Amino acid sequence: MDLIQAIILGLVQGLSEFIPISSSAHLIIVPWLLGWQDPGITFDVALHIGTLVAVLAYFWQDWLRLISGALRSLRAGNPLGDPAGRLGWFILIATIPGALAGLLGESKLDELFHGNTAAGARNGILIIGIVMIVLALVLLAAERIARHQYDMDHLTLGQAVTIGLAQATAIIPGVSRSGSTITAGLFMNLKREAAARFSFLLGTPVIVGAGVKKAYDIFKPHGTPVPDPTLFAVGMIVAAVSGYAAIWLLLRFLQRNTTLPFIIYRVALGLLLIVLVLAGFRQ
């Protein structure tokens, strides 16, 4: 991997982690289309650190409010009595399905989508194309059904857990963590911006966990070698800056617009990938 590739992959991760188009899918698609080698788990850690920095930098005030509210509610002996604390506990509980899915299924999916053979890569791309389209249609249904009435403070525990279950499906490349959770939030009649904000808050612990796990895989005895520190740093910084920009832009975009552009993009990309695979591209 060279400097240009590190910058491009950092941009891909930063933008697609928070926009509902699937970062894990794009980190597979872009190298496949351009004929690059898989950047590997060590560079993946750099990209996760970058997007973690972005989401923490953007939502640090929200997290302070949630954590202080949770502690305040514990001291009062009523964990659900404080609105901010209640939302914090809901996020913690709703994170569990995604964390379990990552622990139990990530390694098997890595084998499927990061295979070393050309045939295995094409099969993975074909699956991603289909999944991109399916989630787009589900998101379209959510847009049509949703009433866009509520802020995230109106969520019940059951609704939060349902969104958490949707997040668990994001271990499949092409689903998208933000896409699945925003879609579920819309089905819960959240306003679009509220669904996106809850999605980002809910995804933060999972991004932390994924980064810690991948870092352990690197630094454990006989783990994966650490790449060029310069490329590591470049990927992390680009992912952080572009990720912060993506959060800022998406939240403002959804205040007045629908998710239709992302639906169209997902369908178009999914169809393109299916056509390329069936046409024998990269055979």
Image: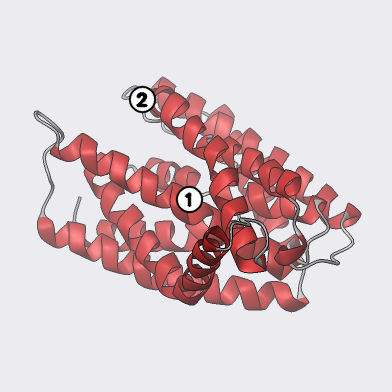
Q: Quadrant of residue 168?
A: top right
| Front-most of residues 119 and 234 | 234
Q: Is residue 240 above or below residue 96?
A: below
* Quadrant in the rendering for residue 29: top left
The residue at 45%/25% (across/down) is: 104
Few, some or many residues within 10 Å of mark 2 (<14, 14–19, 20+): some
- Kind of residue at disc 2: Gly
Which of the 4 quarters of the picture holds residue 232?
Answer: bottom left
- In the rendered image, residue 228, in percent from the top left (x then y), is placed at 10, 53
For the point 39% across and 63% down, the residue is 11
Residue 8 image point, x, y percent? 34, 61
Which residue corresponds to the image point at 26% horizontal and 54% vertical from the top-left? Answer: 46
Query: Residue 72 location in percent, x, y?
Result: 53, 67
In the displayed structure, 165 sits above or below 211; it is above
The amino acid marked with disc number 1 is Ser
Q: Earlier in the sequence, mark 2 or mark 1?
A: 1
Residue matched to label 2: 115
User: Closer to the camera, 30 or 228?
Assistant: 228
* Colouring used for the render: secondary structure
Please state, as top left, top right, bottom left or bottom right, where the C terminus lies in the image: top left
Q: Nearer the viewer, mark 2 or mark 1?
A: 1
Seen at 52% across and 62% down, the residue is: 75
Report how far apart the C-alphas of labels 2 and 1 lie in the structure: 18 Å
Contact (Cβ within 8 Å) of mark 2 with mark 1:
no
Q: Which mark is residue 23?
A: 1
Helix or strand or loop: what does disc 1 sit on? Answer: helix
Q: Badge 1, how many Cα within 10 Å: few under 14, some, many 20+? A: many
Relative horizontal placement of residue 64, taking residue 226 as reference (left or right): right
